[in-house]
Amino acid sequence: MSSYKIETKCVQSGYRPKNGEPRQVPIIQSTTFKYDTGDDMGKLFDLEESGYFYTRLQNPTNDYVAAKIADMEGGTAGMLTSSGQAANFFSIFNIASQGDHIVSSSSIYGGTFNLFNVTMRKMGIDFTFVSPDASEEELEAAFRPETKAVFGETIANPALTVLDIERFAAAAHAHGVPLIVDNTFPTPVNCRPIEWGADIVTHSTTKYMDGHGAGVGGAIVDSGRFDWMAHAEKFPGLTTPDDSYHGITYAEKFGMGGAFITKATAQLMRDFGSIQSPQNAFLLNMGLESLHCRMKQHCANGLAVAEALSKSSRVDFVNYPSLPTDPYYNLAKKYLPGGSCGVVSFGVKGGRKDAEEFMRKLKIFAIETHVADARSCCLHPASTTHRQLSDQELADAGVAANLVRLSCGLENTEDLVGDVLQALG
Ligand SMILES: *Cc1c(COP(=O)(O)O)cnc(C)c1O
């Protein structure tokens, strides 16, 4: 499908039924798969043939949907995971282990920050966090000989900073490591990071891709462009034999296009079992079929709400990359010309208490630990998702104590603007 436009890929990529097969993606609700001989199944265990034997590693429904997302992003291979957290964990743990180091943008989702800064540090992987606005020198200084990847979010949740993907990709590549980009907020409808030099793309499909708040999930896409063998000493997991599969070497056997996802499936899915349920993959695919239509309305609503907020005297600041006054407007024009997302964050004048009062007065926007679905919702990160962060870490993550995050859903634009203005009083 790769020559078609994104709208066609949203609808048609992935599952391609043959003569007489179901038109809709079949839900293969089966933990296991039957073979005529042990030899047939043995070939799968040796990675000599591709196929299915146990849904903890792979399931056809998931693979249809992963193939669609990979095609939408312009990658060569993809996989679904049980959550966005699992996707980001796998994307790094697939190429980094104890003693290694990652350079990450400091402006990232709170759950990802915690995963990196606390849990993965306990596993012996070190992180240096750099501002997405870091100068060339600051970015350069963050690298070490044991650095294995650079990580950032296209549009950060909830700070709404925009990553200069080309600049971060160039820095990563100069050090022989891949750039991993979490593209959850724009979705491939609004930005395809691989076109700007990213090597691996991750998603929390829980957000716009599912789009209806129905299923938690994640995805990883490989661009197929990173030459692991050219930096073989940095990535021994991909470039030296894996004893658990009779000594195959992923980068040799599966090439640049397949090595990363095959290894993540064969080792990480096998050992951690963070598979998305086929039922959720089916729901995700339903979301993907209308993603291009929905993103337009999310973006129109986001822009209208951001504009109304920026004119209000009750508002301290507004973060919305598609707003001409936003510090990230120029990057948004470059990377997100068709719109950014439906999430707007802003500061209520006064402080923490005023932010909480604003939230109480809202009628359409519901208070939820969620963003990016059909129903508008709102959150006060400092007292919820980011409450584990110190004031300094909050500031580094671009989250002020009076910051409210609004997620504009698919409702009528005037109704949403009206709700926000009445709640500001
Ligand atoms: C929500 C989110 C995640 C985590 O995804 P889950 O599906 O909740 O595990 C990761 N990155 C970003 C940008 C997110 O918004």
Image (spheres, rainbow, N blue to C red):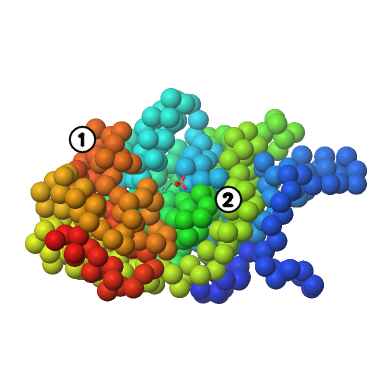
Nearest the viewer among 240 and 346 is 346
Of callouts 1 and 2, which one flags the residue occurring earlier in the amino acid sequence? 2
Nearest the viewer among 347 and 109 is 347
The quadrant holding residue 421 is bottom left
Does mark 2 have its CB less than 8 Å from ligand 1?
no
Q: Position of residue 67 (x, y in %)?
A: 61, 59
Q: Which mark is residue 80?
A: 2
Within 10 Å of disc 2 (Cα), the crowding (few <14, some 14-19, many 20+) is many
Could you tell whether 371 is left or right of 420 in the image? Answer: right
The quadrant holding residue 150 is top left
Q: Is residue 98 visible?
A: yes
Say if 11 sits above or below 185 in the image: below
Say if 198 sits above or below 192 in the image: above
Q: Position of residue 275 (x, y in %)?
A: 61, 44
Within 10 Å of disc 1 (Cα), the crowding (few <14, some 14-19, many 20+) is some
Could you tell whether 97 is left or right of 411 in the image? Answer: right
In the rendered structure, which amino acid carries the disc numbered 1? Answer: Asp
Q: Secondary structure at mark 2?
A: strand
Residue at position x 51%, y 36% in the image: 93
Residue at position x 67%, y 64% in the image: 25
Q: Position of residue 27 (x, y in %)?
A: 69, 57
Residue at position x 64%, y 52% in the image: 278
Which residue, given by chain and number where applicable, does mark 1 sit on? 391
Q: Quadrant of the N terminus?
A: bottom right
Q: Quadrant of the C terminus?
A: bottom left
Measure how far apart labels 1 and 2 are at the Cα level: 35 Å
Nearest the viewer among 315 and 12 is 315
Q: Position of residue 324 (x, y in %)?
A: 20, 68
Q: Secondary structure at mark 1?
A: helix
Q: How many marks?
A: 2
